[in-house]
Image (cartoon, grey):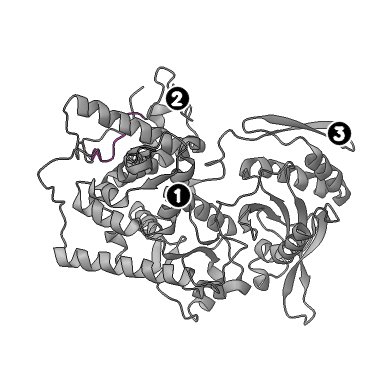
Amino acid sequence: MSVSCFSADSSKENPYEDIELESQSSQQSLPSSPVTDENSDSESEVEERAKAHRQRLTTVQSILSQPNQAQVHFNGTNTRNCSVEQRKLFEYFLVVSLQKSKAGGHYLPEVTQQFPPKLERSFKFMRETEDQLRIIPQFCFPDAKDWEPVETYPSEMFSFVLTGEDGSRRFGYCRRLLPSGKGKRLPEVYCIVSHLGCFNLFSKVLDEVERRRALSPALVQPFMRAIMEAQFPAPGRTINIKTFLPGSGTEVMELCRPSDSRLEHVDFECLFSCLSLRLLLRVFGSLLLERRVIFTAEKLSTLSQCCHAVVALLYPFVWQHTYIPVLPSAMLDIVCTPTPFIVGLLSSSLPQLTELPLEEVLVVDLGNSRFLRQLDDEDSILPSKLQTALENVLERRRELMFSVFISPDSGHLSTVVSEAFVRFFVELVGHYPLFITSEREDGYSSSSSSPVPCSFQGEGFRKAIPSKTVRRFLEVFMETQMFGWFIQERELHRQALRGLFEVRVQEYLDSIHENEHRRVNRFLKGLGNKMKFLSKK
């Protein structure tokens, strides 16, 4: 039975089964004649670029391997040590307001309301939480120094990520708005901190918090207590929260946890509206080589949405380094680190940024769809034919969405975009299971279908690719931490992995075996104008 997270045309198990970016058929029986990719650059120029890429990664690995190398814990995305799922919907709820500093020159963010009011559990948990409570206000108001009282301010939603010392992640869901009243006043932020990555669920909770706080701040705590005491929902399940509201009586709120929250908080359309496809793919290539990338925008919501979206494009790979969707100006020196990072920075901090001694970094202006600073090789990172095929698919994303879904919405658009990038990675590394082998008791290698420890045959994996430019890219990509983590997870837990990528890889390998049987060589079949992305309804 085919596993699929899509529900479109019920007549087909998988409406995406015909997608092809570049069917390069990575099976071990490859074409005997060499294949040369079209490339306007000379052989020596290409080799020099690849050498420079490898040198950058070697330098980063050397820095990261130093025992005293400081790590940024509060915003990394290392998930390999994630703790067991928490039983409560959230850990704590905060109201953060701007207060006049003692010097009187500017405002500082402070926690003015907290629920639950007292920290419990272990001392280690309390110490870590106290550390986070001190730093969270800065993420709620990364632009605190720029604020003065205003009469109007549009409410906006954004989020940030906190990472504990053990690698476990917490999400901060924020609603920033003006409190009820008249005349000029300062905004405040409602912030929910939870282990659960579920943007829409907490957006709904914050809607209700906003409504109740406008009536009376005293109505917020009983509501949040009801949320905290509610049964933790399983994926795909809905829970009902009963609360009392003066004048309205008992009310019931439904909260649904999505079955697959991988794309639940992602708004790809925001990313496409801020960057041209050509620039987006250059950013994508830079992140695959684990470079330092800074995004700038005027609004917190834009930074938050675009950073989360660009990280989601990396699936099934996971960004292993510093990840700060909204960087407080007080922490700006973090961008001087020589290690990789993804950072979001409000445009108001750009003057300070220009004064810092930055290492090689890509600075992306989301407001004007341009690079403020670059390394000048971004357009030559990805294999040219795979990049062209991916770009063609993304240009047709709306057409493809309407061809599959009867009543398409933004969520369906995210599904189509994600599928395109998944197919990119299937074409790039989808043959990896053929090169993960285990040692049997008789000494012979076998398929890794058993729990026996496995090993990855990297050299054979890379050489199995007929395309020279893809092999060159893989030679560099295989040195990244995200690729190392990807392989390590599959060496240890391959049979337990059942995500979308693994489903597409199995379909890909099945098609290879089928075509081997028919003696059909599908190497580089399709390529752009011949590729099929989705089946027709």
Closer to the chain start, of discs 1 and 2, is 2
Q: Main secondary structure of the magenta part?
A: loop
Q: Secondary structure at mark 2?
A: loop
Closer to the chain start, of discs 2 and 3, is 2
Residue 472, compared with residue 360, is above or below; it is above
Residues marked 2 and 3 touching at CB (< 8 Å): no
13 horizontally vs 49: left or right: right
Q: Tell me the quarter of the picture where residue 71 sits.
A: bottom right
Q: Which residue is mark 1?
A: 488
What amino acid is found at the position of numbered circle 3 in the picture? Ser
Q: Position of residue 357 (x, y in %)?
A: 47, 81
Which one is in front, 248 or 79? Answer: 79
Q: Which residue is mark 2?
A: 8
Closer to the chain start, of discs 1 and 3, is 3
Q: Residues within 10 Å of mark 1 (few under 14, many from 20)?
A: some
Q: Which residue is mark 3?
A: 248
Q: CA distance from mark 1 to mark 3?
A: 55 Å
Q: CA distance from mark 1 to mark 2?
A: 34 Å
Bounds of the magenta span? 17-26
